[in-house]
Amino acid sequence: MAHCHDTGLKLAIPENVKKIVLAGNPNTGKSVFFNYLTDLYVDVSNYPGTTLEISHGKMDEDVIIDTPGVYGLSSFNDEEKIARDIIINADIVLNVVDAVHLERDLFLTQQIIDTGVPVVVALNMVDEAKRQGIEIDYQALSSLLGVPVIPTVAIKGQGLEKVKNTLHSATKGRITPGLKKSLTDLINRVGSQGEALLVLEGDEVVASRHGILPGKERDKVYMERRKRVNEITAEVLKEVRQGASFATTLGRLMIKPVTGIPILALALWLMYKAIGVFVAQDIVGITEETIMIGMYEPAIKGLISKYVTLDSILGQFLAGEFGILTMAPTYLLGLLMPLVVGFYFFLALFEDSGYLPRIATLTDRVLSSLGLNGRAVIPMILGFGCVTMATIVTRILGSDRERRIAIFLLGLTIPCSAQLGVIVGLLAGVGIKLTIMYIVVIFSMLVAAGTILNAILPGKSTDLLIDLPPLRIPRLANVLKKTGVKSYGFLKEAAPLFALGAIIITGLQVTGTLEVIQNLLAPITVGWLGLPKEAATAFVMGIVRRDFGAAGLTSLSLTSMQTVVALITITLFVPCIASIMVLFKERSKKEAAIIWSASLVVAFIAGGTVARLANIFSTGNEVNIFAVTIAFVLLSIGAIAVTKISRKKLFSTFRV
């Protein structure tokens, strides 16, 4: 009698009996195969050292062992450790693959093949694939993988008998190109191709078993494997319209640039009309102006005045212009909460319908040039509602590097809805040409800042790995629940920050520091930006509230060009005090200070550059707006080029 000691499970197995292991991604239908193959002869054991249960049973004289659903073999968690140990010691692996998510599931298939274990692939849920208009050439897939591939519909029993009859015809497949030599060198040291592969991929647990150092080829091997899977998928998978549902066809159109961009533009326009117009103007007009300013603030001031003089220092801290009981709740509850609820409602709609991952997929290629992936579109969209909220949402990004880039771009180039409303109002008075120039300048800064950060920050951003669920009509109960939970979470996290911001700004006002800052900024606003001295007040107020800063420009006598210069500067200027507080919470104090000061410097450089270019390309009172715009774009491209060349030379110097 032999024991299945290599897997950790103590099973009595006769010498000539095969260990047949089921493997696959989560939710591929492995349990149906296991129940069919084992019939009633099933047992369950705890895997040693874990609370996870492993099912095993008999098929004739062979032993069938189930494994947890995993996306890969590694030591990252208990499920992957167990699947890894059982699979590399198997005699045969039955790999259950979801036909709907072929490109995703074949990565595990190829990794199992690379271990050198004989494999049979059960291509499950082919009926659902057909409904979604997905056609797969099974014979070509079998030929390319080098293993038998059986199409199945497990829940209907289709193909199960053929899978059972094919198990003993399992073959070792075609390993990932470029692996053979490296594996051969390691097999002599570790004894098996499976363990050699895991050592090569940097599995510390497996390497320690043999007293050797883990390899450093993980990224290279994974990239080659992904490349091979993509090539196989491209050859065997065909999307057909016949038989595809309307939702499937629409889902495909959403991720193709030619059709996806107009669909996204329409969705964003509808969201803007609902939130940027209806909520930001009508609803906020009621919550902020009527309720908070018209009713709440007079009531709270009247109450406090009974105990404290409002002109006193304590009175100003409590109920002054920036008081913690006046400005903070008015700004948070009257202005932001309706916008936050509106954005979270739309986000929940996009998420519950399956559209959100398609937006991420559509924008992935563009955002990758900025050091981000498609998932970053979520905080970017939210930023147009509230940068404070969007900064918190950057937690969904896959790496610290991506969060740094996203947070900087949010604070620098994305105006919140409150500020955007004022900006649109001011741009309405300067004409279409200057409005286009404003948009081009801000977009150029977004691209330049993102590209430069991507070039200079160490490391590499993560790839977009995302499932595309079927499109469906959102369930209102789910949408409302998600909206409520996330809105409450924002309120709970933001309220203390708004109170702290109110205390800081009131302190600056009471001590006279606010006026000192205004005077210090005056030389920059007049000498460099070409604006009136009073514009300094708008920049200071922009720290308190971004729309305060933009609104402060309305009282100044500015030319059209001065208005655009001021708007460019105020847009790129540091975000409001609430966003700054969240920035210091999300990042280290040092890094937050660098991001804050950098956005301040960039804002004045960009605004001043536009002002200087306007002087250069002006004849009398006429400014060549087209020339100013093109010149600014060329300067942005030049900054990107200089950064990349300098970085390349720096690296070359260090290598020498």
Image: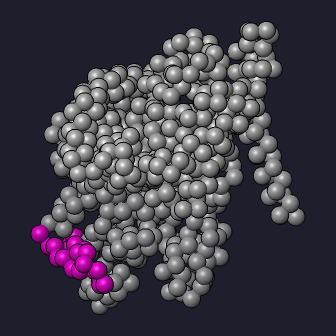
Percent coordinates x, y for residue 433 in the rendering: 62, 12
Q: Quadrant of the N terminus?
A: bottom left
Q: Is residue 41 magenta?
A: yes
The foreground one among 585 and 551 is 551
**Residue extending farthest left:** 40
The residue lying at 47 percent from left, 36 percent from top is 546
The residue lying at 46 percent from left, 52 percent from top is 507
Percent coordinates x, y for residue 344 in the rendering: 30, 39
The residue lying at 81 percent from left, 46 percent from top is 645
Q: Is residue 525 magenta?
A: no
Q: Residue 96's quadrant in the figure?
A: bottom left
Res 198 seen here: yes
Span colored in magenta = 40-60
Judge whether 67 appears above or below 302 on screen. below
- Is 652 situated left or right of 39 in this image? right
Q: Quadrant of the C terminus?
A: bottom right
The residue lying at 16 percent from left, 73 percent from top is 42
Its colouring scheme is: one colour
Res 391 seen here: no
The foreground one among 167 and 207 is 207
